[in-house]
Image: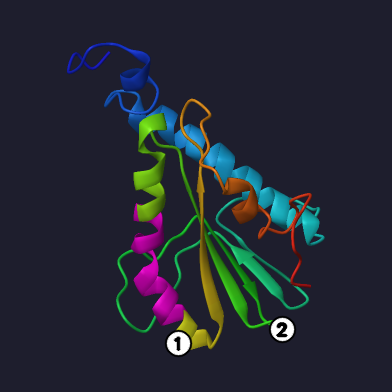
């Protein structure tokens, strides 16, 4: 479609410059939306749900908007932020749907991408921070250990609840 590379599954699914802006984004947003919905549903918000909103229940807040910080942080918009006020913890959840051969690199990128945001939010809110990279390759490959990362998320069947 792009006439820039040989047409094969590796190019078409995650890397075609013609398809990537729309199809990659759709796949990413479906995964991010499902995770956001699962967390919101688990915490008791069952009404009208929409991405790019902030929801608060008891001592928990989940949102999908940029994090405002005192210092300028370029990577300030993870896919989902979950703040447990009572427990003084915060999860930055970032989703990526890379090429199957690129899952290790993408996980490392996601962890390092949010280091500055972790430090700044930890300082400002006085919380323990953790970035949770959710990497699911375009053809369905997952990295060993993803199930342990997903257990940190409320609503996961085996979640280790902080509540």
The residue at the point 46 percent across, 87 percent down is 124
The residue at the point 48 percent across, 82 percent down is 122
Q: Residues within 10 Å of mark 2 (few under 14, many from 20)?
A: few
Viewer can see residue 63: yes
Q: Which mark is residue 123?
A: 1
Q: Residue furthest left?
A: 4
Q: Quadrant of the N terminus?
A: top left
Q: Quadrant of the C terminus?
A: bottom right
Q: Which is nearer the eye, 143 or 68?
A: 143
**127 to 36, vertically: above or below:** below
Q: Is residue 7 left or right of residue 89?
A: left
The reply to whether the magenta stretch includes residue 116 is: yes
Instruction: Write the start and end of the magenta stretch as one range.
Output: 109-121
Q: Is residue 17 left or right of residue 36?
A: left
Q: Is residue 5 left or right of residue 92?
A: left
**71 to 101, vertically: above or below:** below
Rendered location of residue 23, percent (x, y) = 43, 28
Q: Are marks 2 and 1 in contact (CB under 8 Å)?
A: no
Rendered location of residue 161, percent (x, y) = 76, 66
The residue at the point 59 percent across, 59 percent down is 53
Residue 15 falls in which quadrant of the image?
A: top left
Q: Mark 2 sits on what residue?
A: 86
């Amino acid at each position: 479609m792009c006439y820039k590379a040989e047409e094969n599954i590796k190019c078409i699914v995650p890397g075609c410059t013609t398809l990537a802006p729309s199809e990659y984004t759709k796949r990413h947003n479906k995964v991010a939306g499902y995770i956001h919905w699962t967390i919101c549903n688990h915490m008791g918000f069952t009404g009208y749900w929409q991405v790019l909103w902030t929801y608060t229940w008891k001592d928990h807040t989940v949102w999908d908007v940029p994090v405002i910080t005192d210092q300028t942080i370029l990577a300030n918009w993870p896919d989902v932020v979950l703040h447990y006020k009572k427990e003084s913890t915060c999860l930055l959840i970032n989703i990526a749907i890379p090429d199957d051969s690129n899952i290790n690199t993408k996980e490392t990128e996601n962890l390092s991408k949010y280091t500055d945001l972790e430090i700044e939010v930890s300082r400002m809110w006085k919380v323990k921070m953790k970035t949770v990279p959710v990497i699911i390759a375009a053809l369905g490959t997952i990295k060993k250990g993803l199930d342990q990362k997903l257990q940190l998320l409320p609503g996961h069947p085996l979640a280790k609840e902080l509540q």
